[in-house]
Image (spheres, rainbow, N blue to C red):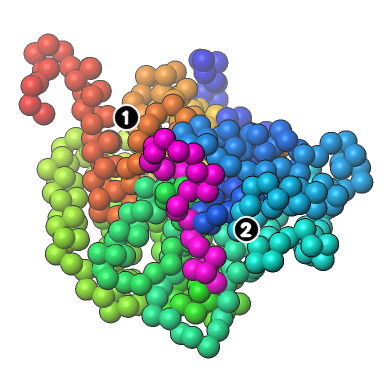
Amino acid sequence: MLDATPKEIFEREALRINPAKTCQPIGAMYAALGIHNCLPHSHGSQGCCSFHRSHLTRHYREPIIASTSSFTEGAAVFGGGTNIVQSLQTIFTTYDPDIVAISTTCLSETIGDDIPTYISQAYEEGVVPEGKLVIHCNTPSYVGSHITGWSNMTTGMVKYLSTKTENSLQQINVIPGYVEPSDTRQVKQLLKQMGVNFVVFPDTSDVVDTPQTGRYQMYPKGGTTIEQLRSTGDSQATIALGTFASEQAAIALQDKCGVPYRLLELPIGLAASDRFVQTIIELTGATPPAELEDERGRLVDIMTDMLQYTYRKRVAVYGDPDQVVALTEFLVSCGMHPVYVITGSPAGKRFEERVKEILKDTVPNAVVKADTDLFYLHQLIKNEPVDLLIGNEYGKYIARAEDIPIVRFGFPILDRIGHSYFPTVGYQGGIYLLCNILNTILERLDRDSADETFELVR
Ligand code: SF4
């Protein structure tokens, strides 16, 4: 399908082809699903909301709930105030959520809809029942990416809900970044193993990966409760996992409630997981249990046992900036050479400098670029091939065109299963991710072996 991609690379500024990112409100909707009993609401046309819902539904293979202001030409000309108040009326009388989280769209941002004023109007008109809440964030999709949207909605949770009271709580906040529900579950598991009191927000585990019970629940049991979100203002500290998704909310919480924060990279791989555990120890005085040390030891064991297969493998990595940064460090620690590292999000110099820092001793000539696309990555690969692609599903076209094995990692993955059930963070997640990478390499080795080297034991 991509056979016509030219080798010759031209500098492009105004055109993206096969972008390695998606629309801002998708991230906001995903974050909103991480609040218990929350209905995400899309302030725009039905088409936007349908796209956001279907993209998330296909990735998680779960029904994703969301409502829309259903803009028509009239709203586009006169503003969407009437639509949003009418929507809130319908939502609270028909669907009865505890909270509605509004994200905007390109259209409502372009016409300049003033969401806080509309929300105040809804409260004044008695549209929002006693005890129910409405929060919002702005998510114009012509800037940023789904990561920006996730960050903006998470920051909106802080701005509307986090409260500083007289009580100082012996708990830490963890903002997990734009990750799978399996990852959030793994982060919580690690915190429980260490005996720490915590609030993880937003938390999409048990929301977008619910068990089949034979009974549809519009609001599944998971999600951070409103009470927990309020209590984040009384926590000892916040750990923000991921510069690009999580830091903005941590800063907002520090500014609003005086809760200090530590910024870490996503705990993908050995070193980043170590730093996460070490930070928990420093903040709480907790001691890692033996079972956690065992998990760590098993990851180290696989890394060393299988080094012969990962050593100096040329890899192209693409996707969301926080995941790409952490994954790059993990791959280097496994002896691999990430020669092309790109993100579609406008993550700027902060992304590029951090990745180059990770690669400076092993792959100093690596191509590292933010705010670019998969067309560019394909051109790089055409010029100098790689052994392996690691990234979201959209790389499968390059994989097919160039006959390169691909490991699916990140968002979105619409054609495979497992990503929402198996973590990639923490030691356990590192084991899963590395096995996935190794099995892909070994599969290719088998396929390409001549009869005399087609080994039973690898
Ligand atoms: S119009 Fe904007 S908000 Fe709507 S789907 Fe397209 S990019 Fe996303």
Q: How many marks?
A: 2
Tell me which amino acid carries mark 1: Asp
Whether the magenta-drawn stretch holds residue 407 is answered as no
Majority secondary structure in the magenta region: loop
CA distance for labels 1 and 2:
48 Å
Badge 1 or badge 2: first in the primary sequence: 2
Which residue is found at the position 49% from the left and 79% from the top? 234
Q: Position of residue 167 (x, y in %)?
A: 49, 86
Looking at the image, which residue is at 28% across and 36% down?
437
Q: Nearer the viewer, residue 11 or 108?
A: 108
Q: Which residue is mark 2?
A: 99
Circle 1 residue: 387
Please say if 421 is above or below 358.
above
Q: Nearer the viewer, mark 1 or mark 2?
A: 2
- Would residue 219 appear left or right of 107 to someone viewing this image? left
Residue 46 percent location from the top left of the image: 73, 35
Residue closest to the eye, 171 or 265: 171
Measured from the top left, where is residue 363 in percent x and y?
34, 46
In the foreground, 287 or 144: 287
**Residue 21 is at least partly visible in this image:** no
Please say whether residue 212 is one of the residues in the magenta stretch.
Answer: yes
Residue at 73% x, 60% y is 128
User: Magenta segment, which residues?
Assistant: 208-230
